[in-house]
Image (tube, rainbow, N blue to C red):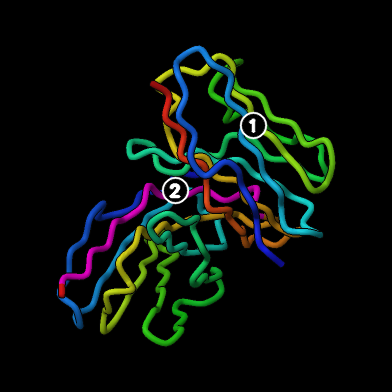
Amino acid sequence: GENVEQHPSTLSVQEGDSAVIKCTYSDSASNYFPWYKQELGKGPQLIIDIRSNVGEKKDQRIAVTLNKTAKHFSLHITETQPEDSAVYFCAASSGGGADGLTFGKGTHLIIQP
Amino acid sequence: DAGVIQSPRHEVTEMGQEVTLRCKPISGHDYLFWYRQTMMRGLELLIYFNNNVPIDDSGMPEDRFSAKMPNASFSTLKIQPSEPRDSAVYFCASSFLTSEKLFFGSGTQLSVL
């Protein structure tokens, strides 16, 4: 089955700086890679996703990059703000529905004022 | 729509007691998932249903755990008897058809003393 590794487990950055979270996956058949954000006391919420037919996707201050050859993908947050503080999860799926999603263990992002 | 609704938000119980967690998925969603979140293991898929039918329960840790979905708008996860190692946050999530996007509830924080 799929195995998703996520690093780092905790990341502390100064407000205004950039943050990068990295994930690797094992199954070469995986073709869908979402990122979820979990704020304190809430459930995870999808913030951005990418499919294997593209290498990069952006949405305002967040972007995701994918390297299929190396089987890794990353989340980039620029100009970090206090509201970016949360736990971020990456996931991978070979498609066909949410039943195929395998999650990483999460990264606790702390934005220092 | 109010989103995925879980109850209770917090549950504190003593070892050996029965615990029942409840979930109401988003109307029209035909997939329902139960996840468990711990610091050590991250998000673990316990079981999921499609059109009220359990499809994969391989993530259920042992026979003390059971889940039901009597209709399209309600599901329960039961632990009997509960043990301290069951302490975790339990999430319910739903999705629609073959969409990979998961909608999570706010979770139930379970503490077994």
Q: Residue at x 43, y 52 (%)?
A: A25
Q: Residue at x 72, y 39 (%)?
A: B75
Asked where in the image residue A52 lies, by quadrant, the reply is bottom right
- Return the x and y of residue B60 as percentages of the image width and height: 58, 27
Q: Secondary structure at mark 1?
A: strand
Residue B77 - label: 1
- Return the x and y of residue A77 as percentages of the image width and height: 32, 76
Q: Is residue B106 rendered to the left or right of residue A70?
A: right
Q: Is residue B38 rendered to the left or right of residue A46?
A: left
Looking at numbered disc 2 in the image, what kind of residue is underneath it? Ser
Q: Residues within 10 Å of mark 1 (few under 14, many from 20)?
A: some
Quadrant where the C terminus of chain A lies? bottom left
Q: Is residue A68 rendered to the left or right of residue A14?
A: right
Q: Is residue A47 magenta?
A: no
Asked where in the image residue A107 lies, by quadrant, the reply is bottom left
Looking at numbered disc 1 in the image, what kind of residue is underneath it? Leu
Q: Residue at x 64, y 35 (%)?
A: B47
Q: Residue at x 45, y 25 (%)?
A: B86
Is residue A110 placed above or below B16 in the rendered structure? below
- Residue range in magenta is A98-112
Same chain for labels 2 and 1? Say yes or no: no
Front-most of residues A19 and A42? A42
Q: Secondary structure at mark 2?
A: loop
Front-most of residues A32 and A69? A32
* Residue A1 visible from this viewpoint: no
Residue A26 - label: 2
Is residue A64 placed above or below B71 in the rendered structure? below
Q: Residues within 10 Å of mark 2 (few under 14, many from 20)?
A: some
* Residue A27 visible from this viewpoint: yes
